[in-house]
Amino acid sequence: MKILNVTPTYYSINSIIGGGEKGVIYIAESLAQASKSQEGILETVDILSFGVHSEEINFKEISLTVCPYQINFSNPELYNYLRKKFKEYDVVIVHQCLSPAGIYFASIASLLNKTTVGFDHGGEVAIELRSRPDHAKVYDLFVAQSEFGAVSFKDLNVEFIVIKGPIPELQIPMNISYGNSKKKFTSVGRILPHKGFEDLITAAPKDSEIVIIGNLYDIDYYNYLQEKSFSLGKNVRFESSLSDEERISEVFSSAAYVQTSKHIDYRGTFHAKPELLSLATLEALVLGKRSFVSKAGALKELADVHGCESYDTLDELSMHLEHTLNNRSESDNQIKIIESTLAIYGHSRFGAQLYAKILNLYLKNLFK
Amino acid sequence: MKILLVSNLFPPGFIGGYELAASEVASYLSEKGHDVNVLTSNFFKNDRQIQQFPFSVERNLYYDGSGFLDSFTPSKGMDTNFFNIDQLTRKLVDFRPDVVFAWNTHGIGSVGIASILGLLEIPTLHYLMDNVFSNFNPTKFQGSILENMFYDAIRNKRNYKLLFMSENLKREVSQIISLHDASISILPGWAEKPSAKRLQVENGEKTRFVYASRVDEHKGIHLVVDAASELVRQNQLDFSIDVYGSGNVAIYEQIVHSKKLDTYINFMGSVPQTEMRKLFANYEALLFPTWHREPFGFVPIEAASAGCVPIITTAIGAAEWLQDGQHALHVKRNYKSLASRMQYFMTLPEESVMKLARNGQSLVEKHLNKEIIMGMIESELNNLILNKNTEVKKNPVFHFLAFQFLVSRSLNLEKKHTMSTGVANFMRKIWVRVPRKMKPLMKKAFLRYEPVRYIAKE
């Protein structure tokens, strides 16, 4: 079975550096890893995305092709290109599947009688689905990354499943000293108001170090965070250009990971879908880090995971963080044992193998 | 074999020969044991109550009769009707035909129907007895995704075949759509096999002409009247013309009366096709000065079959078979030419008239008789099934949804149903201030717009 992942945006500085885009890579990598280790019918897993220039980006197991087309629905060249491309595959996995671009890809795949699976409903929902939800039937199956994300699929009369993850095998850097990082809290996400980083800055103990890792997407919000950290006298470091390995090192070497996303941002603007899963939190859990998450979007669903706790109020978060610092008197070895146990548990819940196994099972059925 | 016949009209109500031919073929195929289902429009409202066929006829399509397109059409000039494609795909799910037999798709969205059938890879035989693609604008169509879908469909030789009634029609259609690489055949019209050879012509005082078509200018009734007037002016009085058919009869009766031609031209009303075929034997010649773009013309063939010599416009579809001076007489499309040919015919010796009549009868018997043409249609349908490309895996209704999305998005149609954000926000603001009594009126006026629907729900 040849699988093509199609995504309107991809994980690159030339497109968007976000969890949704990273998720595409993780899903494709997990499937590719599974194709080697599991008995299945998977043969090839590729990713197709769109940009200004033609590009081929290689990841560990897979490669991402960027075709030089803007997504313009009136462009017959794009239509012909996609038809030709889709014909080479058996299954087309569409990411940001309910967005206009997603429905566009799925429509073409569906007309070619390809098994079409929709992942991650995306931000903007195509207007056609509002007046005629039947349009979603161009998909054979939807895969939601959380119960919260699955809500969008519930009225569409198409089968859907929820699989959280996946996080493929992460390259954990060697020689990381625990001693320097016992007071460090990390948080990952694009610098956007709904990420709620100001809550972490407010709640973190004064003697702790806060590392916020993410690309700068909103300069006003960044300035607001800077002012906040100065006024409260907190030690905040912003990291906007870290590689994947460096990001993993930062999270791995911290005392705990915090995800503070919120529905109502610092300006009072409401965000309906602040987090559909939070891949960064899952990464932290798979690395064995204790994690504290708000209850916005899908985050509250992570609270049942061993090592992850959710909070309602800033006081509660503050208490969690202080408690973490106070309890960090264990030796490096003890920390290693605790975190390894958490990591094993994290892997068993969100690892590539389980994810691919479940997905493979569903795809096999569809493929019949 | 399971055959789904698609046509904009299907008797009992009819406008011309196209739908009559469709019903004749459907009845023939049904008699041959094929499972025939017809999908047509409800244009003639009373037809729904009349069940005169031994096969199922569903009248669910939308056809406005004028050939112009309705509000479901994505854009004038693209000739696609989403409502009809929706109905068609539903029918495909219910009936699961082996082959679709498309007839007159004019005004029900020819391009859209061809495209969706192509996308579904359902074997389709499209019998063109008229230019069913005249509704769309090639300039607008060029470079669109719909163009790709359409040409993919008609160039898939294994699944889509175009049958043209004449070279004349093929020429006209090829000026609008490119027929390059399409699978094409020419299959003419037909008539019943001559029941008996004409032995002699009535040797009465007058030459009896007949006009049997729609009483309308495009069929040339005005030329017939003017030609009769010209003959009278030239003191050629030994003729009569019986006019059969409906249309603008009252107007032409008045014209005939005003020109004092009542003794020469008689309006006989409209008679059923079967009866008309018998009546042709009572006349010596048929007057058929129809427009040049006549794709074929069943009437001259039926007349020829009965031994009635057709006098027809040169270069129409039927003229490709009925040769001038051999089976028929050809005229230029003006009253002087018609009058001179009528005069020529009136002065022909009996043997020459008999020769023309018998030649016409033997042409129909050998090449254009119903049994032969129907057999050819049946074998064309069979060939398509034998060449069938692939099985349809997915539900055609889902294909329609995909098609609708792609076509409407490629034409930016979704914008038509939505307000701009500014207007929508303004509406939201004033909605709370609208007096309660006014709200239903507001809803009625604006409910078709998506944002207002949401406001109304709130």
Image (cartoon, grey):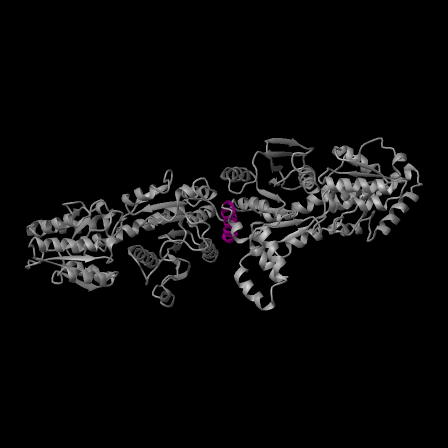
Quick check: is B195 in the magenta stretch?
no
**Residue A111, image x, y percentages:** 51, 46
Compared to B374, does A186 lie above or below? above
- Quadrant of the rendered image containing residue B70: bottom left
Instruction: Look at the image and tell me whether residue B208 can be seen.
Output: yes
- Quadrant of the rendered image containing residue A132: bottom right
Query: What secondary structure predominates along the stretch shown in magenta?
Result: helix
Instruction: Look at the image and tell me whether residue A291 can be seen.
Output: no
| Residue found at x 85% / y 46% | A203
Range of magenta residues = B394-410
Q: Which residue is more in the foreground, B186 or B310?
A: B310
**Residue A96, image x, y percentages:** 63, 45
Quick check: is B402 in the magenta stretch?
yes
- Left/right placement of residue B78 relative to residue B214 reads right
**Residue A167, image x, y percentages:** 73, 41
**Residue A262, image x, y percentages:** 76, 49
- Left/right placement of residue A179 relative to residue B417 reads right
